[in-house]
Image (tube, grey):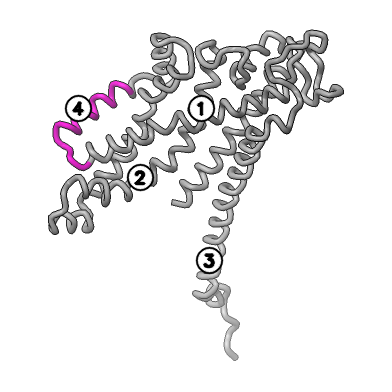
Amino acid sequence: MSERPTALERYSWSDALTARDLGREWRKLRINSLIIGGTILLLIVILAAICAPLLTPYDPIAMNLSEAFLPPLSPGHALGTDNFGRDIWSRIVYGARMDLQIAFLAVLFPFAFGSLMGVITGYFGGKVDLVFMRVVDVLMAFPFLILVIAIMSLLGTGMKNFYIAIGVVGWIAYARLVRGETLATRNLEYVQAATVVGCQERRIVLRHVLPNCIQPALIYVFTGMVLAVMTGATLSFLGLGVQPPTPEWGAMIAEGRQFLLMAWWMPTLPGVALLIVGVALSLIGDGLSERR
């Protein structure tokens, strides 16, 4: 009689392939879940900001001292009121407009300028690259937030100066990412082929190298948006960003911190709104980075 096959003999290549395929499908499902979940959260916030006049009947800056410090779930004020009687829900919804504006606008110049500098210095190298890296090393020696605060202290408060400060500092990360990808790409076959057929260097950089090196920078945009929102909230908390009575989550936290023990909802609820936006953008960024 023949002996019964062992477990190792019964395990066929088809079983191995099946297990590998299941692992691959599970990874795709997890990545897609991250992207879809983050996108849904972000869309909810964007729709709330767009439809703010329809979602609340109150003016976000109108004061009503007779209704000050109403707790959440009070009649007519689902999230309560602040020390001036302003509706917290209204201020959070209208504040989403400012924070989303910061998230999107604060990454445009750093992304465009940093990507362009990274591909130019990475492709041409030489003294240009040497000077570029020394500038980057100097700027990288300072923490991002400290450098932004220092620039804001010199320029003064206001959103215009905030965008200038973010632009001066924020391009570094994009430039480093794109430069590294360019160094790995410039000697590949399709770049060499474009050089052999006589393409101009400008065309090679913009049409062949940059589109193939930009993906890491695009993924980092979502991390940059989170950083921009948190930086804007921090500067508003310190009195350097958005100025009262304009609704902005960081400024709301700063106004409510002195009333934390008697009106916990004033600083807490805007902080929750910041957390939701940060989580949404982080989920999208994580999903895209794993999908790469």
Which residue is the site of mark 3? 21
Dot in front, 2 or 4: 2
- Specify the label residue 214 is tagged with: 2
Q: What element carries label 2?
A: loop
Q: Distance between the residues labelled 4 and 1?
A: 31 Å
Query: Residue type at mark 1?
Result: Ile
Q: Distance between the residues labelled 3 and 1?
A: 42 Å
Vertically, is 32 above or below 219? below
Dot in front, 2 or 1: 1
Query: Residue type at mark 4?
Result: Val
Taking the magenta stretch, the answer to whether it contains residue 2 is no
Query: Residue type at mark 3?
Result: Asp
Query: Residue type at mark 2?
Result: Ile
Dot in front, 4 or 3: 4
Magenta part of the chain: 123-139
Q: Residue drawn 55% across and 66% down?
A: 19
Which residue is the site of mark 4? 131
Q: Is residue 129 left or right of residue 38?
A: left
**Camera-nearest residue between 281 and 20:** 281
**Camera-nearest residue between 9 and 74:** 74
Q: In this view, does 18 lie to the left or right of 203?
A: right
- Specify the label residue 102 is tagged with: 1
Dot in front, 3 or 1: 1
Q: Residue drawn 60% across and 82% down?
A: 4
